[in-house]
Each structure stands twice: as structure tokens, then as C-alpha cells.
Image (cartoon, rainbow, N blue to C red):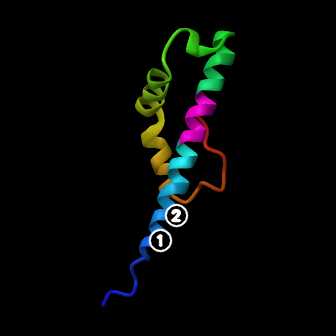
Amino acid sequence: MLTNLPDKASCLCDLQDCIKAQIAEMERFKWLLGERLGHDPLQDRTLNEIYCEWIQKYSASFRTWWEDGRHTQAFSV
């Protein structure tokens, strides 16, 4: 039996934490976009479009940041 593998519950918690952090970053991106535009970005585009933009621009660096264990530090877009 393999004993050095993390248990399923631990992996699930890590995944949930990662997803929550990604959603928080996408919301922060939406807020920063609104600050830059001077109005709610949902007036011009859908939430899906805004989230897709974040995914295209920042998801790879977010994943590296998360996997490197740096999620105790702030992620910057």
C-alpha cells in the first residue's frame, strides 16, 4: 500500500481552497477593471466575459503561484 500519497479529503480541501482563491482573484480583477473604467464593468460586458479575460491573462501564473506554495503571499495581477 502506498503511504506517502495524500488522502482524498486533504486533496479535496486543497482543491476547494484553490478554487475559492481563484474566484476571489477574478472578483478582485472585476473590481480593478471597474476602477479603471470608472463604472461597473457589468454595464459593458457579462461576468462570463470578465472571468474569461482573467482566465486567459492570469490563470497560468495563478496556478504557478498556488503550486509553488506562495498562497500565503498576495497574488498580483
Residue at 45% from the left image edge and 39% from the top image edge: 59
Question: Which quarter of the rendered picture does the N terminus lie within?
Answer: bottom left
Q: Nearer the viewer, residue 46 or 61?
A: 46
Residue at 63% from the left image edge and 32% from the top image edge: 28
Q: Nearer the viewer, residue 2 or 73?
A: 2
Q: Is residue 57 above or below residue 36?
A: below
Q: Is residue 25 magenta?
A: yes
Type of amino acid at the residue the image marks with label 1: Ala
Q: Is residue 3 magenta?
A: no
> Pointer 2 and pointer 1: residues touching (CB < 8 Å)?
yes
Helix or strand or loop: what does disc 1 sit on?
Answer: helix
Q: Is residue 3 above or below residue 50?
A: below
Q: Where, by quadrant of the figure, is residue 23 drawn? A: top right
Q: Residues within 10 Å of mark 1 (few under 14, many from 20)?
A: few
- Counting from the top left corner in percent of width and height, residue 15 is at 47, 58
Bounds of the magenta segment: 23-29
What residue is disc 2 on? 13
What residue is disc 1 on? 9
Q: Residue furthest left?
A: 1
Residue at 53% from the left image edge and 43% from the top image edge: 22
Type of amino acid at the residue the image marks with label 2: Cys
Q: Is residue 13 above or below residue 66?
A: below
Helix or strand or loop: what does disc 2 sit on?
Answer: helix
Give the main secondary structure of the magenta stretch.
helix
Question: Which quarter of the rendered picture does the C terminus lie within?
Answer: top right
Q: Residues within 10 Å of mark 2 (few under 14, many from 20)?
A: few
Tell me how far mark 2 sits from mark 1, CA to CA. 6 Å
- Counting from the top left corner in percent of width and height, residue 55 is at 43, 33
